Structures are given as C-alpha cells and as structure tokens.
Image: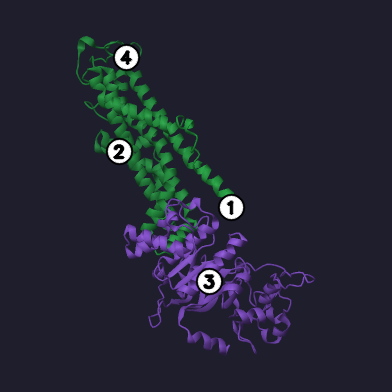
Amino acid sequence: MIEAEASTSSKAGVLRIANLVVQAGRGQDMTAPVTDVSLDVCRGEAFGIVGESGSGKSLTLRAVIDLLPEGLRRSGGSIAVRLDEGADWVSDVATLRGRGISMIFQEPMTALNPTMRVGDIVTVGARAHRGLSRTQAHDLAVELLAEVRLPDPEAQVRKWPHQLSGGQRQRVMIAMALATDPKLLLCDEPTTALDVEVQDQILQLLDRIRRDRHLAVIFVTHDLGVIRRLCERIAVMYAGQVVEQGTVRDVFAAPTHPYTAGLLASMPTLDSDPAHPLTAIPGGQPDPRERRGGCRFADRCEHDQPDCHTMTYALGPVRGHASLSACRRADELTGALS
Amino acid sequence: MTEQALMEVMTAAANPRRGASRLRLLDPALIGAVLIAALIVLALVAPMVSGHDPALNNLAQRLQPPSGQHWFGTDQFGRDLFTRVFVAARIDLLLGLLGALIPAVIGIGLGCAAGYFGRWVGTIVLRLADVIQSFPNYILVIALVLLLGPGPKSFLVGAAISAWVTYARLVRGVVLRIRSNDYIAAAQAAGLGHRRVLTRHVLPNALPQAIVYGASDLVLSLGFLCSLSYLGLGVQPPAIEWGQIIAEGQTFLRTQWWISIAPGLAIIYVGIAVRLIAVGMERRTTE
C-alpha cells in the first residue's frame, strides 16, 4: 500500500476519479449502475479495468469524457484531468474531447462512419480543432495510418470503411484517436470483437503506441489476459463497485478479494494443470434495482459469513498486501485466496 | 481468411452493376430520369415544335379534335392543347418539386433534431406533427387560401406546413437507429460539436431513405397542386397548369373528351416516371 502510493505520487497524475456515482432514472425508478468508484491514472501508465458485463466498467470509462448513454448521468463524485505536468486540473471533461482525451470503441464494424472516406474519418477531430487545410489533413492521415501499420497508407486514405476488414478498421479507429494528439487514451474493449490473431496485433500496436507517445491508457475489458499483458495496474469492478485495486503483479499473484480470486481461477493459462478443470463462479451479479445492504458479492461468495450480508465495507488496505480490497474478511482470507 | 472472403462478397454486393452492363439499361431510375428529361425538353421547345402560341385564342378553330394541325386538339377558345399541355409542364414540374422540396428540408431538419437530441426536442416535434396530422391537408390549404388568397403561394405554404410531418417521422426513426452506432459516439469523443455531428455524421446516413420517400412525395405534391388548381385555388390564369386545363375541359367531357384527357395523361406520365426513379433509388439503398 505504502509502496504503491509512493510509486504513483512520483509520477505525474493524468486522471483522478473520486467517488464517482452514475445514476439512471429518477425517484422510485432510480438505480445506480456505478457507485463510489475512485481511480488515479498516471502519465504513460497502462491502467486496466476488468469486470463482467454490467459491472459498470464501460460506464466509468464513458463518464471520463462525459459521454454517458442517454438516460444515465453522473450524479456524484468528481472527475479531473490534467494533461500536462504543472497544469491545472480540469473538471469540465467534455471540453477535453479531442483536445487531449481520445477514445477507442469496441465495435469496429459500426465505429466508422460509412459515408466518409478513411482519410476524412481519421482527421475528423484534427480538422475540427486545428483548421487543417486539405493537403495538411491528407498528410496527417497518411502519417497516422503509417503509424498504426496499415500497409500502403496513401491508398487507404481514399478507401471506404466497408472495404476494410475488422482489424484494419480498428487500426483506422486508433489512427483517428491519435490524430488529436491525446495524452489520455480510453479503450473500451478494443479487441473484443476481433479474431484472436488480429486481437494480438492490435494489442501489440496499442502497447507500442503507448510507449512511443508516453500516453496514459485505460483498458476496459473482461479479458484478464489483455490486462496481464498490457497493464501495470488494475481495478476489478463488480456490480458497480471497485472490489480490488492494485498492481497487476500483486493482484494476479495474491488476490485479496474472493471475486478476483474467482475470476483468476476461471482464466485458462498455459501452465494450467489439465487435471484441474477451470472453475466458474456460480450465480450472477445482483440486479442494481435489487441491491440490499452488505457486500454485493456475498450471495455468490464461498467465504461469506452472516455479517457479510448486512455490513458494508469500502475499498481499503489489507494487512501484508499492497492491494486495496473491498472484502471485510480480506485480512484473514488472503492465504486461502491465492 | 473468412473475413477477407466476407469483405469481397460485401464489396461485390455494394456494386451489383459492376460487369453487368446489360442490366444498366433496365435500371428503373434511369428510365424514369429519361422520361422526365424528355418532358422538360418538350416543355421548353413545345411552342416551336407545334408552331402555336399556347395562349392565342382562335375561335374559328375552337373544340377541334386531335388532327395533323392540332396534335392534341384545341379547347373552347381554339388554343392548341399540345402546346398548352407541355408549356404547363414548366409550372407543374417546378411547383411540384418545390412542394416536395420545401417540406423535405423542414421535415428532415426537424426529424434529425428530434432523433438526435431526443427528450423535449423530440417530444415537441412529435406533438407538433400530431397536431398537423389531425387536420386534413385540403382543409388546411383552403383555410390558407382564405388567408393568403388563391395562387401558388398558398399551395407552397400549405405543402410546407403539412407535408413535412412524414419526412420528420421517417428521419427521426432513422436517426434514432443511427445514433446508437459507435461512429456517432466516436465523432463526439473527437470533440465535434452537435452541429458538426449532425451535418457530417448523422445527416449523410439518414438522407438516402429521406430521398427515396421524397421521390414518392413528389407525386403526391404534384397531385395536390393539380387538385388545388382544378378547384381554382392553385395556379391562376393566365398561367397555364394541368389541373386548370382539366377543369376547363370538364364541361365538354361528354363531347370533346380530349381537352381533359391530355393533361390527365401528362400527370400520370410524371407519376410513373417519378415512381420509377423512386424504385431505382430504393433498390440502390437496400442493396
């Protein structure tokens, strides 16, 4: 814990989320798909948010550029972004879209406007903000398409999205995100919709770009393998909450929350023992409308005690570990979990 | 590999006419366009072709049946109907087009706004559409004629007020679907304002379907114009217009049927030609 704090404060913070709450509906129908999420991301860092569908991980990411789907709103907490060391923290994040923050989407088939040519798609943001001339925009597009390793970028610029494969489209989308020279790149399941081989290429590309450009990147995914490969730190989300947070090395080696332990046990690795089948976590996430007090994971937890169902416990330090955990039994359980 | 094959199939489907040039001649949109172009040319040169002045009275030649000298016959003032029907096409095509274009612009604009912004903007547009639709078009325009007087202005204002509703409902539906695509979120994430997102990302994707409907609406607009003129509320003499010629010939329908038949056929001709264009465009957008 102390070690982790020291290592973050030595780097420049780019994003600070404190006690974020995202709500849907009003009055009686009100639900909160995201409650009390706090994260810090540093310059040049790869941060992973992992969780199952409906855990609130994508909403947390979208809240960072104020692009929540209709009907959802940020109702609490604060988000602040600082693009340059020494600059002020900006809390009106919508103004930073295309001016320091970019986003990459999950579905390459629907994320490129079918009525625009690739060159125009790539430079859409750059032209809007920098008033590039036609030739400048063209040159920028060619340069970026080369950076994302699309062969023959001069020819790609004139193509339409339907002429590209899924992997090529994803590269175009990455080029589009880079066109505005971001400091913070948000990736919403960037490889989920792709073939396994293509996934691998795109991940390598994103990792290389992050190092070359010294970008802060947030990966939202349900794929622990992606996080393990690319990220330095991880937040595990469950039912709208962060249940565990720490460095990838610590969390993978010694999880401090039963949910993380369950996720890791359900993930195949090269050295998995074929004799021990992968285990699944029984049950599903509680519906946000039917949440009661107590730990949200308690109903599915194999270590639950009566208190777990009534007493809430926030993310906090664990004895002997650097990670933060939201399990009230973390101190006594860590031996059993890893 | 499968992805590559799939893209090839999709590219081929997007260009179905490639290498099938003999089908090009059967493209309904092309046939329709040729028919309309022929009508426009004749509308411009008809007086020269026939050698008659469309407005010149010649009582000696009144109510002549179609002949070598008067191809479509003459009306009760002895005016050459061939020349009159084609000269009338100038006004009918122009006003018919405007009667579809003006509501199309209004309806597409309001539909885009309603679909994109949703919430109260959508509610206002939909309620407004309900109010307009609760009045029959003709009643609305007849009320306008009382207000503005008979003439093309009343027709255009009437069309603008009533016909945008269908465009708006259609485009709103299309935009609701478009808005859920990630490319809209991607454009917003790139920092584009609502105006840019709407004009460059939403509108171009919604337009094809609005245009296909617009082609059908053009026929409705022309029919509306001719009906009003027939009732004496639309285009006024001395301007020449099909509905007005039909009304003039009505008295002689039992004996001199050709007076009303020629402009009637002209309306049907335009209807078929425009419908062909619509069918051709529909095929292109659905393929």
Query: Marks 1 and 2, Cα distance to the nearest angstrom?
Result: 51 Å
Chain containing the residue with disc 3: A
Return the residue at label 4. B252
Task: Give the mark nearest the N terminus, 4 or 2.
Answer: 2
Return the residue at label 2. B156
Q: Nearer the viewer, residue A65 or B147?
A: A65
Q: Residue at x 70, y 87 (%)?
A: A332
Return the residue at label 3. A207
Which residue type carries mark 1? Glu
Which residue type carries mark 2? Leu
Q: Nearer the viewer, residue A312 or A124?
A: A124
Chain with colour green in the figure = B
Numbered disc total: 4
Judging from the image, what secondary structure is the residue with disc 2 in?
A: helix
Disc 3 residue crowd, few under 14, some 14–19, many 20+, Cα 10 Å: some
Please name the color used to draw chain A. Answer: purple
Work out which quarter of the rendered image holds the C terminus of chain A and state it: bottom right
Query: Marks 3 and 2, Cα distance to the nearest angstrom?
Result: 60 Å
Quadrant of residue A97 within the rendered picture: bottom left
**Left or right: residue B134 compared with residue A208:** left
